[in-house]
DNA sequence: GTTAGGG
DNA sequence: CCCTAAC
């Protein structure tokens, strides 16, 4: 039997960094690190940073002036992180940053990373993803392994639940971080007078899931939707029913363009068909069990103030989750078809100098007045140079949730394998990069070049209507979509995309969150696969708009809802690979490749790389060799059989010609060799 | 570290 | 795009 579990996690608890697979050979070759560095994901990083901050924010509210508690917590986190990363080369360190009584935060920073990025250690740095992972792992333990460090956090602070810990992330802080091509700046500020925690993620049967059309069973299951119960939370719908994948290109993108693309000076927008191949029919007759997402929901919050203690909120959740685990027993893993799931590409790996920026303001609604316009708190220095000179819109993103996951795993799988599977799924999704969509009044704002003022986002009364959603990255995003002139603004209400993760299909269906509100009916989803393909019904969800699952970002007011952390297997971390994102060659690149091969011939891939792709860091000579291989193949097949961005026939002809020529040369060489040998023998 | 080829 | 063998 195959079990399908819908997993809804608060983003906070599920920040999984892209973990490169360190194969033995990779380690041996020392390419591990390089690969790792190549896998930068700005979009995700951004989110992780924000979420990570929240998660790590000082547990205690502004009232906390207990320095010893700070120390304790820091120590706890330190040990947790250390424990989590002990097998890593990097050293993590927890730092406490005092930013005023109301802004006490604890940061964990990967010093080496910081250093590498050239950031001043004095910056309020939030760790790279790694930290989040470590913490998440720690937090997850109570769930899957009895007690854990997570609880220690709380216990030491008279709070004993993760939720509580997470709920205290209200603190304000400023963060600056640079991820290669991405420069992020996040500023948050504690709103001292937060409204009572009243809302959280609750389930709503009114909102169905966006499910894989291929799986009627799943569709029928209609897992509960995750919606905000916070009446005050106006979460714009995320996603657009009509938004097929390509349209998303217009979405604000946190990532910068590819550097190597610039050399070509030409970018190629993704064609719709590329991303809409219908999910392969699997003929899956297995019975699938859809587990209500509630079991996986994170720290649901009760609307009424009766439950002010987030601890209480969390306990049930953990129990449920524990049950879930217990019920899953098996001995065999159904490994993910990872390649199928790494289809998203993240443009974040830009080699260029473009930097994107993210400014977040945490002003609460209660203190929104100060949130609308103000630049006074902008830090001086180099970072602000990326900020608009005019009035600043301050937004606050309380949390993001990881896109929904549907996982199939044999009943006979072990719990451990389930964990690994989930981990892989999450890693795959997040590791592939996320994009951020901006919604205003439920409508997607696609004009990336418009100013906030022009779109009306900057208007105070519109801030509440502003929403963000996470979307998996398309296989390729026109670099141009990340204009350096558009700083990123995010707000608290962040609906989250839903992701289906059927391992059998190898196709990820992505639904974008929707809000149960009647007017808010935007649904969007797309199918992504690692293959270029004919357009598939972009509306796996549209047809079933009612089925689309709503995952509403945690309302601005509750943060604790994010405490849920799925089981992470630190010990298996290294086994969870992060496949490089797929980055189809553009015609321009093909052109360059062909030209170089014409000149240098096959078999000199390193030279080809140096000659034509020297500044395209993500193109290794192996990539070029592989590309040539596929080019030759492509040239030989009929145009109808070709997929992906069409390569001009002229180029293909040259490919064949060059291939033939150099093959001949090679043959000649061999012949000569043989002759020489025979001569010697004679 | 490169190259070649299977997956 | 990954992985390995072979050099």
Image (cartoon, coloured by chain):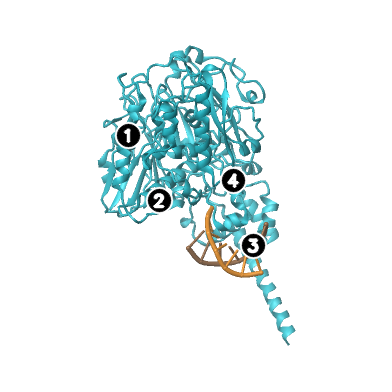
Chain colours: A cyan, B brown, C orange
C-alpha distance separating marks 1 and 4: 34 Å
Residue corresponding to mark 2: A506
- Note whether residue A48 is visible: no
C-alpha distance separating marks 2 and 1: 30 Å
**Disc 1 with disc 4 on a shared chain:** yes
The crowding category of the residue bearing disc 2, from other C-alpha atoms within 10 Å (few below 14, some 14 to 19, many at least 20), is many
Quarter placement of the C terminus of chain A: bottom right
Residue A157 point in image, percent of width and height: 44, 26
Label 1 with label 4: CB-CB less than 8 Å: no
Q: Quadrant of residue A11?
A: top left
User: Which is nearer the eye, A62 or A270?
Assistant: A62
Label 4 with label 3: CB-CB less than 8 Å: no
Closer to the camera: disc 2 or disc 4? 4
- Judging from the image, mark 3 belongs to the subunit labelled A
Q: Residue furthest bottom?
A: A682
The crowding category of the residue bearing disc 3, from other C-alpha atoms within 10 Å (few below 14, some 14 to 19, many at least 20), is many
Residue corresponding to mark 4: A89
Label 2 with label 4: CB-CB less than 8 Å: no
Residue corresponding to mark 1: A317
**Disc 1 with disc 3 on a shared chain:** yes
C-alpha distance separating marks 4 and 3: 45 Å
The numbered mark at residue A658 is 3
C-alpha distance separating marks 2 and 4: 33 Å
- Note whether residue A625 is visible: yes
Residue A17 point in image, percent of width and height: 51, 41
Label 1 or label 4, whichever comes before in sequence order: 4
């Amino acid at each position: 039997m195959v079990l399908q579990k819908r997993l809804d996690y608060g983003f906070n608890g599920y920040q999984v960094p892209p973990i490169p697979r360190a194969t033995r050979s990779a380690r041996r070759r020392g390419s591990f690190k390089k690969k790792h560095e190549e896998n930068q994901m700005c979009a995700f990083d951004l989110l992780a940073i924000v979420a990570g901050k929240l998660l790590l924010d000082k547990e205690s509210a502004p009232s906390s002036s207990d320095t010893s508690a700070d120390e304790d917590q820091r120590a706890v986190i330190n040990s947790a992180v250390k424990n989590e990363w002990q097998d890593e080369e990097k050293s993590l360190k927890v730092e406490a940053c005092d930013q005023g009584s109301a802004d006490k935060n604890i940061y964990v920073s990967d010093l080496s990373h910081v250093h590498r990025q050239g950031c001043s250690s004095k910056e309020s740095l939030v760790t790279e993803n790694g930290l989040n992972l470590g913490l998440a792992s720690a937090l997850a333990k109570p769930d899957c392994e009895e007690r854990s460090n997570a609880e220690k956090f709380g216990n030491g602070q008279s709070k004993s639940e993760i939720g509580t810990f997470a709920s205290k992330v209200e603190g304000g802080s400023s963060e600056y971080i640079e991820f290669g091509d991405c420069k992020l700046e996040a500023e948050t500020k504690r709103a001292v007078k937060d409204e009572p925690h009243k809302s959280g993620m609750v389930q709503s049967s009114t909102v169905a899931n966006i499910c894989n059309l291929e799986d009627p069973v799943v569709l029928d299951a209609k897992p509960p939707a995750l919606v905000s119960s916070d009446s005050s939370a106006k979460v714009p719908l995320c996603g657009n029913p009509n938004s097929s994948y390509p349209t998303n290109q217009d979405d604000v993108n946190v990532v910068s363009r590819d550097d190597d693309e610039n050399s070509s000076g030409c970018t190629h927008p993704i064609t719709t068909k590329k991303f809409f191949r219908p999910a392969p029919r699997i003929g899956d007759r297995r019975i699938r069990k859809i587990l209500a997402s509630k079991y996986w929901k994170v720290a649901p919050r009760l609307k009424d103030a009766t439950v002010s203690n987030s601890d209480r909120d969390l306990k049930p959740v953990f129990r449920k989750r524990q049950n879930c685990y217990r019920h899953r027993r098996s001995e065999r893993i159904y490994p993910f078809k990872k390649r199928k799931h790494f289809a998203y590409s993240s443009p974040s790996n830009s080699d260029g100098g473009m930097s994107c920026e993210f400014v977040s303001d945490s002003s609460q609604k209660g203190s929104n007045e100060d949130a609308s316009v103000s630049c006074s708190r902008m830090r001086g220095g180099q970072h602000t140079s990326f900020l608009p000179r005019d009035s600043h819109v301050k937004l606050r993103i309380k949390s993001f949730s990881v896109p929904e996951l549907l996982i199939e795993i044999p009943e006979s799988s072990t719990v451990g394998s389930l964990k690994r599977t989930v981990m892989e799924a999450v890693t795959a999704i997040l590791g592939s990069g996320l994009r951020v969509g901006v919604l205003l009044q439920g409508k997607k704002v696609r004009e990336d070049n418009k100013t906030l003022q022009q779109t009306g986002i900057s208007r105070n009364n519109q801030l509440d209507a502003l929403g963000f959603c996470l979307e998996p990255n398309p296989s390729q995003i026109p670099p141009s979509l990340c204009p350096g002139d558009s700083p990123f603004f995010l707000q608290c209400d962040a609906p989250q995309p839903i992701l289906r993760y059927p391992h059998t299909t190898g196709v990820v269906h992505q639904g974008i969150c929707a809000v149960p509100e009647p007017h808010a009916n935007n649904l969007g989803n797309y199918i992504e696969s690692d293959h270029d393909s004919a357009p598939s019904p972009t509306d796996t969800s549209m047809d079933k708009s009612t089925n689309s699952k709503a995952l509403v970002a945690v309302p601005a007011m509750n943060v604790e809802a994010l405490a849920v952390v799925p089981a992470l297997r630190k010990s298996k971390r290294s086994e969870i690979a992060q496949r490089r994102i797929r980055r189809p060659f553009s015609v321009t690149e093909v052109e360059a490749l062909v030209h170089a091969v014409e000149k240098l011939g096959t078999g000199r891939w390193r030279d080809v790389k140096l000659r034509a792709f020297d500044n395209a860091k993500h193109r290794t000579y192996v990539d070029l060799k592989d590309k040539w291989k596929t080019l030759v193949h492509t040239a030989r097949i009929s145009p109808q059989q070709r997929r992906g961005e069409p390569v001009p026939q002229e180029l293909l002809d040259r490919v064949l010609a060059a291939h033939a020529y150099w093959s001949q040369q090679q043959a000649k060489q061999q012949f000569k060799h043989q002759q020489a040998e025979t001569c010697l023998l004679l």
